[in-house]
Image: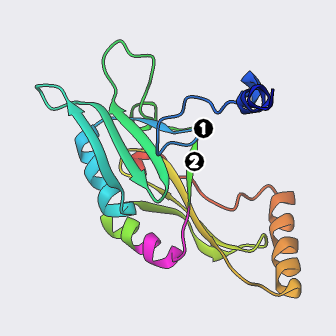
Amino acid sequence: MPSARRKTRARRTPSARRPSIPKGFHTVTPSLAVVGGVAALEFYKKAFGAKELQRQVTPDGKLVHGRLRIGDSMVLLADVFRGSDRAAPSTVETTTVTLHIYTDDVEKLWNRAVDAGAKVTMPLDDMFWGERYGHLVDPFGHHWSLSMPIRMSKKVREEKQRQAMRSFAKGDLPEKVPSLTDI
């Protein structure tokens, strides 16, 4: 009888099972559409220290599938192909997504990305929510925010929050997003 109990306890209910997520991935993984996929792989390696894990290209050099690791996160990317339902930000001149990177040294990563060709859309600044934070746009039209937690006194945090809320009340955005022709 005791062995039967052990088997019952060892079984997991369907809701308790972990989804079939490949090793190294998290539940949500961004997949970027780009024009110039091989160049994008190289840019992300140079700008963010990404490690290239996979590259599949067509005979004419278009990226069918790229897989990168940035920190502990996977990022997938591929060129846009004719007939696809995906569009690259550089072809539609906008994006609806910002990818965010937390880092232990935001100044170092920021400078690395800018030196690699990213354009600043919101300079790094100490924000009222307790992070040093800024926005960049990469040469392929994808938006990135970079930050790291910082210590800040309650007084400074509250003053920064008041300033930010005054700006929002006036309709001022904390960033100016350039059109892709500015990049």
Kindly report the distance in space between the C-alpha atoms of the residues bearing marks 1 and 2.
18 Å
Q: Eyeballing the image, is 92 above or below 105? A: above
Q: Eyeballing the image, is 107 above or below 33? A: below
Choose between 150 and 20: the one closer to the eye: 20
What residue lies at 54% left-to-right and 75% top-to-bottom?
Answer: 104
- Return the x and y of residue 114 as percentages of the image width and height: 39, 67
What residue lies at 63% left-to-right and 60% top-to-bottom?
Answer: 175
107 in the magenta segment: yes
29 in the magenta segment: no
Which residue bears the numbered disc 1? 27
Disc number at residue 98?
Answer: 2
* Dominant SS type (magenta): helix
Q: Is residue 119 visible?
A: yes
In this picture, which residue range is highlighted in magenta?
A: 102-111
Disc 2 marks which amino acid? Thr
Please give left or right for residue 120 compared with residue 171 in the image: left
Choose between 90 and 31: the one closer to the eye: 31
What residue lies at 50% left-to-right and 42% top-to-bottom?
Answer: 25
Camera-near label (1 vs 2) is 1
* Lower sequence index among marks 1 and 2: 1
- Return the x and y of residue 139 as percentages of the image width and height: 36, 50
